[in-house]
Amino acid sequence: MSDNKNKTLTVLGLGDMGSALTRSWLAAGYTVTVWNRSPRRAPVGAAVAATVADAVGANALVVVCLLDDASVRATLDGVDLTGRDIVNLTTSTPAEARALAEWITARGGNFLDGGIMAVPSMIGAADSGAYVFYSGSARLHETHSEALAVPAGVTYVGTDAGFAALYDIALLSAMWGMFAGATHAFALIGGENISPVEFAPLMVAYQQAMAGYAFGTAAQLASGDYTQDVESNLAMMATTNDTLRRTALEQRVSPELLEPFMTLMERRVAEGGGKESTTGVVDLLRR
């Protein structure tokens, strides 16, 4: 099933991301009605609604891109959502997304949640790699598939409304860990006559080479055998922790970004997981 022939939609929220989304739809020939809580210049070509109710009433497809879950509820509270297809692109937790789906449905609307894996400059840009996780109403996803594919790629992850947020936050968490490691590495070389610009390509190449480690972790989690195809076991890796700590001390750098993970590694070894990979640490976190 394709989108409605009129190619119309509403966007609530004109922050950096909401504005980028709006511009992408306008460039693709869509008629876009917009609303923002505070005065802000709307993208050229968008129709500005005076109220939320006017904006929601203008089109069947309503895309919401606001600050947080509370702002979404506050914005839509009291607005007639009957028959409206609400696509929420506001960052939230899985539980918040599920609760919002019930809240929207109870008010007569249909709900699809989204997790945007991009920054505003990537939206609508060809070959940028931007995509959005979607979960919730399969009918809504299918009905508006063409419109949803305009700003970025689309990855539908199921009818559970919380899954898009879960995938989003899980990947962001992985990214945060990568950022933490890079931050520590730059701090280590910071006091020496080493160019961070020349060091960066080496770090990126090494991170890319190590990224495939996640496939081994996934296979071990699926099989339940954490010693499967292990090349460097946890006991061996944990012996490196002392060197990392001493190097940080020598370079006058705090090890606090690495310490939590190193402590978990050592705890798993102490509990008998020395022959495993780092996969056993997953279980420690889930206790």
Image (cartoon, rainbow, N blue to C red):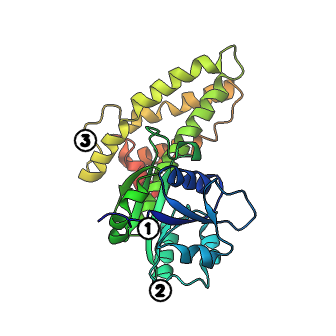
Q: Secondary structure at mark 3?
A: loop
Q: Secondary structure at mark 1?
A: loop
Q: Alpha carbon of mark 2 to alpha carbon of mark 3: how far?
A: 48 Å
Q: Residue at x 44, y 41 (%)?
A: 129
Circle 3 residue:
228
Image quarter (top left, top right, bottom left or bottom right) of the N terminus: bottom left
Q: Earlier in the sequence, mark 2 or mark 1?
A: 2
In percent of width and height, residue 139 lies at 33, 71
Q: Which of label 3 and label 1 is nearer to you?
A: 1
Q: Residue at x 47, y 86 (%)?
A: 106
Vertical side of 176 occupied by 184: above or below: above
Vertical side of 25 occupied by 273: above or below: above
Left-right relation of 165 to 279? right
Tag 2: residue type? Ala
In percent of width and height, residue 73 lies at 60, 76
Q: Residue at x 48, y 84 (%)?
A: 82
Which numbered disc covers residue 106? 2
Q: Earlier in the sequence, mark 2 or mark 3?
A: 2
Tag 1: residue type? Gly
Q: Secondary structure at mark 2?
A: helix
Q: Earlier in the sequence, mark 3 or mark 1?
A: 1
In percent of width and height, residue 224 lies at 26, 52
Image quarter (top left, top right, bottom left or bottom right) of the C terminus: bottom left
Give the camera-side residue of 62 and 98.
Answer: 62
